[in-house]
Each structure stands twice: as C-alpha cells, then as structure tokens.
Amino acid sequence: MAGISAVVFIPDDTSKTGYSRPLMLQRIMGSPLLSWLVSSLIADGVGRFFLVCHDRYLDEANSCFPADVELKTSMNENAADLLHVFLSTSEDDEEDVVVVTGPAIVLKSAATMGTLARPVPSCVYAVNRGALMQALDATEQFSFLDFLHSRGVAYTDRDGVFTVSSGEELASWQPLLNQHHLLQLVHSGVEIWDYTNCYVDPAVFVGSGTVILPGSILRGQSVVGKDCIIGPNAYLENAKIGDGSKINASQVVESQVGFDAQIGPYCQLGPNVSVGNGARIDGFASVKECEIGEDATIYPMSYLCHSDLGARTVFGSGATTIHDPEQSRRTVIENRAVIGANVNLLGAVTVAQDAVVAAGTTVLEDISPIRQEEAFAGSGKRDWLGKGKK
C-alpha cells in the first residue's frame, strides 16, 4: 500500500443487501469484514485511519480497530472539514493516501499476477494527499467519488485487492482468509497442526514457539505468549495467556492466565478471572470472578465464584464457594490454606493463612489462623484433614 494513512467509508447498504448492518460489518468466522480489512492494511504499513460511518454503526465499527492505531471518526455531514484536518497532520513525506469506499478484501496471496484477463478494479484507491487537500479547499460541494474517478488510482485483483458485493461473495473468502492468517502466524514462529480445524481472529496475537492444536478457536483481542500449548479444542475470547502456559480443551473468556500455568482439560474460566503464575486448575473446574494466586492448585470438579485464593493454596476436588449476591464481600482463602474435598464455603467467609478445612465440611463463618500448639498437638503433626498422625 502507498502511504501510512487510510480513509475508510462504511456505506449503509442495508436496503440493498437486506442485512441488519452494512456488509462491511458482516462477520467472517466471528469477526466483521472491517476487522480483516483493517488488519491487512496495518500489515501493509497503515497506522492512521479516518473513519466515516453512520452514528448507529459507529461503536461497532470502532471496535474493529486496535487500540494502538490513530483513529479519527466522522459522520457524513462533517466529514470533509475533519478529513482536511486529518490529512494536514500526516507526516510531511507522506505522498499518497489509501481510500476505501466500500466492502473489500486485501489478500496479497490471492493476487492474480500473470493472468491474461484484464485487471479488475476494486473500491480501494490510492490518491495524492496534496491533491485531495486542495480539492477539499477549492470545492464547496466536494464529491469524493468524482475525485476518486478522476484523480485516484484503483487497486485491482493483481494487487490482491478485491471488492465484496454480497454475502455470498463474503462467505467464499472465508477459507482463504483463515488460511492466510494462519500462515502469517507460522511465519512468525507459531506451530499449527491442522489448518482446516483451527481458527484465529485477525486481531489475536500469538507469540513464537506456541503450539496451536486442532479444534482451537482464538477470538477477539486475545494475547497468547511464547512457548504455550493451546488445545486441543481450546476456546479463548479476549484472553491473555502468559508464556509457557497450557490450555487444554478449556474455555478462557475475558480473563488472564499467568506464565507456566496449566488449565484443563474441560475447565471454564471467566469472566473476570486472574490466574497467577504457576497455578494449576484441573479438569471440569469452573471459575468466575476470581483472583487465583501464584502456584495455587484447584482440583477437579470444583466451583469458585467471587473468591480470592492466595499463593500456594489448595482447593480440593468437588469443593465450592457459594456467593451471596446481596453481599459485596468476597470469599477469601489466604496463602497456603488447604480446602479439602467436597467442602462448601457459604457466603463471604475468610479462611486464614495456613488453615486446613477437612473434607466434607460446610463453612459458615470465618476460620481463624491455626495456633502453633494446635498444629503440633499430640504425638505427631496433623495431616491435611486435621487428624493426628500416630
């Protein structure tokens, strides 16, 4: 692409297509077409965007742009004045600007170079920045389309740029876009086992050395660190996964996992879960609205909600925390405490540091710290169930 700035129009073509939203916002494998387009433009060096969109679609359109790019938005009635300001703040050496007037795919691997057919122009143009600014100044009733047809240069299929005219055309691009994106990840050092049974959103970041196993789906603004193992059959949505962690056949939604953690299989994390470094959450556990400390262990079939677990805590199989929605306090299990199997913690109770709760107990009140004489009473230390060893 020719410059570092792009002007993107989202035409309201709903009356033509019959869809509830513009074709530019129709989804391919869960992400709007605009997300795929923006991702491709950024990969080609575009870092500044001017978006023209009807106000009822503006929030959805804004979500298609990464937070680290410069984005200015406008509705049609004041677009010309704001566009002039946007162009005037470009880098001095920026000669051309990319202008997108409708639904489009930018996919260099699909370029038709070497064919005998005539090039097919797209709805994406390269225009001279200075000429566009002069036209905006000189013309009271400025017509963008007239200017593009007379002064712009359309990208064509030979450049790997294609106009999308219908939902059927959009569907036909799905396998090509997914495979192209997966190949980009492989070039950055990611290992993918099955290109036909794996999906990664265009805005997802995956670190080098990470392995994505079959059946995995990575969506939204998820970030996966280096040397992780994702899958098989993992689902991440707006998740952050630290280096070296393993997510096996589990769901992580709107949550973050530290480095060297192990999740799964068949766990559900989220929303709003933070898992500390080195923590382990075993099979069929469900965790929501929780803070899990470093090196904590949660055994299978457990349920935690609105709870805080300290570092190196142990939460036994089948144990649960039951949240009272009328209370603002949370369940707190302090560092190195041990919760036995099938324990029920009812309401906002606190289990003190190093305390031990025997299996099958129902806890209604706070558990105070274990005193030294209690911990070593009798002829031997207590085991983790609280019974004296002979």
Image (cartoon, rainbow, N blue to C red):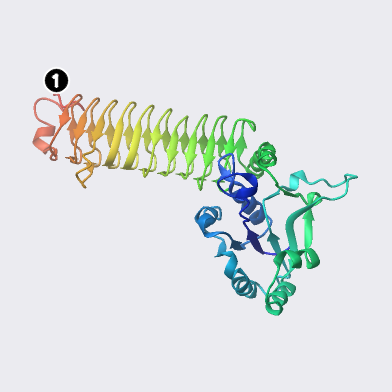
* 383 vs 13: above or below: above
Res. 1 in view: no
- Figure label count: 1
Relative placement, left or right, of 118 versus 321 is right
* 324 vs 264: above or below: below
Rendering coords of residue 343 (x, y %): 21, 28
Q: Mark 1 points at which residue?
A: 390
| x 52%, y 57%: residue | 58
Rendering coords of residue 290 (x, y %): 31, 42
Relative placement, left or right, of 326 versus 35 is left
* 127 vs 33: above or below: below
Relative placement, left or right, of 171 versus 237 is right
Q: Residue furthest top?
A: 390
- Looking at the rendered structure, the secondary structure element under dot 1 is loop
| x 70%, y 66%: residue | 144
Relative placement, left or right, of 281 versus 350 is right
Which amino acid type corresponds to the residue marked 1 in the rendered image?
Answer: Lys
Q: Residue furthest right?
A: 116
